[in-house]
Image (cartoon, helix red, strand yellow):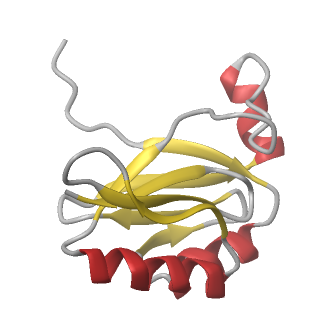
């Protein structure tokens, strides 16, 4: 197998809210339609499509994870410094995200936190 690209698809309730949240955090918008909004993440432009839940669920041929109750997957966003981690925590809170944990040191040489977007998708942010 030799995939030419990989991306992620998440289910959301409100495309406008999702677009506003990730735009406020400074992620580059990759386009939108009446079914999805899409963003680039990181230097390699990893793509996450945020589909309306009612559109994505039938395509998955099974139930979607209840993000408010558990983890579907956790992406990690790397920061350049501890100060950047602290700044991002504030930006995420101001944009409407929820901090699951405050920035903290964990393990040797790791500093970061966990947050959820407005639909409950979890992300780690850390500096190492």
Q: Is residue 93 left or right of residue 53?
A: left
Q: Quadrant of residue 109?
A: bottom left
Q: Quadrant of residue 101?
A: bottom right
Q: Is residue 44 left or right of residue 60?
A: left
Q: Residue at x 27, y 64 (%)?
A: 42
Whole-percent x, y for residue 12 in the image = 74, 54
Q: Quadrant of the N terminus?
A: top left
Labels in figure, total: 0
Whole-percent x, y for residue 59 in the image = 69, 27
Closer to the camera in the image, 18 or 75? 75
Whole-percent x, y for residue 51 in the image = 66, 51
Position of residue 24 relative to residue 120, above or below, is below
Closer to the camera in the image, 107 or 76? 107
Q: Residue at x 19, y 57 (%)?
A: 128
Q: Is residue 96 left or right of residue 88?
A: right
Position of residue 48 relative to residue 71, above or below, is below
Closer to the camera in the image, 5 or 80? 80
Closer to the camera in the image, 104 or 53? 104
Q: Residue at x 31, y 80 (%)?
A: 84
Q: Residue at x 21, y 47 (%)?
A: 108
Q: Quadrant of residue 61?
A: top right
Residue reaching furthest top? 1
């Amino acid at each position: 197998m030799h995939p030419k690209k990989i991306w992620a698809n998440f289910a959301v309730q409100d495309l406008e809210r999702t677009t506003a949240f990730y735009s406020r955090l400074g992620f580059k918008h990759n386009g939108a339609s009446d079914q999805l909004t899409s963003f680039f993440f990181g230097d390699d432009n990893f793509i996450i499509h945020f589909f309306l839940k009612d559109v994505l669920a039938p395509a998955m041929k099974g139930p979607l994870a209840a993000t408010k109750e558990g983890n579907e997957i956790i992406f990690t966003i790397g920061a350049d410094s501890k100060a950047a981690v602290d700044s991002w925590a504030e930006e995420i809170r101001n944009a409407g995200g929820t901090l699951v944990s405050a920035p903290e040191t964990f393990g040797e040489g790791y500093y970061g936190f966990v947050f959820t977007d407005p639909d409950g998708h979890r992300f780690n942010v850390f500096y190492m």
